Image (tube, rainbow, N blue to C red):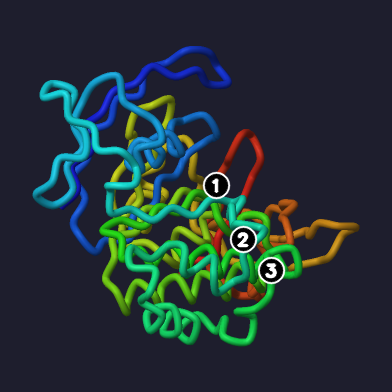
Amino acid sequence: MIELCVEKSLHGVSGDYRLEVDLRLTAGEVVAFFGPSGAGKSTLLRMLAGLALPDRGRIKVGDTLWFDSAKQICLPPQKRQVGMVFQDCSLFPHLSVRDNLRFALVDRKDLKAVDEMLALTGLGNLQTRFPASLSGGQRQRVALARAMLRQPQVLLLDEPLSALDHAMRTQLQDEILALHRRFGTTIILVSHDLAEVFKMVQRVCCLEEGKIRDDGPPLKVFSPQHMVGRWQVHAEVLAIVPLDVLWSVTVLMGNQITRIVASADEVHDLRTGDKVLLFQKAFHPMLIKIP
């Protein structure tokens, strides 16, 4: 069990606000923090990792207090069993892939663990190469492998795949889920990608200006009935037509036909006849295929 009960003053795009979160997460869950920029998602991850301190509150993982303002307890980051992967994967540029992984070990001589992780993540043929010679997807795979080698109680993923193309992002999503099945690590993911949230997590916590507005399974949280005023209706795809760099998608909502502009990621794997959820984000209509 992870107890996250924290408060912190923050500054967002709309001004100063108060981050106030009280969460209980089950060990082994895959959870997403979802919401607009500046809502406090990344700050929560940084507080869990010990890279940012709450003004007050309590963080408990299992039976261990990581932070308690009342008891003046604050474990330093190196003493927290946590792995973290950012969009910028932060590899050591002067170390090979193998040595980047080895650096994460508590026992630097445990070469068997490095060999097993290289094999598990398909990095064996890249182990002598340096980060500068790797693709973005390869660097993120190394960062994930390094984080998992720490055998963390919690793996924190702060939009690590957002800069990758769709094919590579899909591949690494599958690899993260495979690692989760293998190790059962609790994973907390920050993402703006609804398709990624639907695919990867069992629970989503929606943050707005430092408060959790919704919490539950993705299908419940993002259902049209639950998102009154933001979601529209279930719709059926009638046609998908390429534009210059975007796509025109014609959908049927009840007895009404409408056309929206969608990104390449939104229409990837979308076919005529598919059922979608049509919603509005920042005054822009968006859609997601219903699993």
Disc 1 and disc 3: Cα gap in Å? 43 Å
Q: Is residue 193 left or right of residue 26?
A: right
Name which residue type carries label 1: Phe
Label 2 residue SS: strand
**Is 84 located above or below residue 95 in the figure?**
above
Label 3 residue SS: loop
**Is 229 located above or below residue 222 in the figure?**
above
Nearer to us of marks 1 and 3 is 3
The residue lying at 55 percent from left, 84 percent from top is 122
Q: Is residue 235 left or right of residue 183?
A: right
**Is 44 located above or below residue 97 in the figure?**
above
Q: Is residue 255 visible?
A: no
Depth check: 225 or 168 in front? 168
| Residue 102 in picture, x, y percent from top left | 46, 69
| Residue 291 in picture, x, y percent from top left | 45, 71
- Residue under pointer 2: 252
Label 1 residue SS: strand
* Pointer 1 or 2: first along the chain: 2
Q: Which quarter of the picture shows residue 93?
A: bottom right
- Residue under pointer 1: 279
- Residue under pointer 3: 130
Q: Is residue 50 visible?
A: yes
Q: Are marks 1 and 2 in contact (CB under 8 Å)?
A: no
Name which residue type carries label 3: Phe
Residue found farthest to the right? 244
| Residue 59 in picture, x, y percent from top left | 21, 37
| Residue 111 in picture, x, y percent from top left | 41, 80
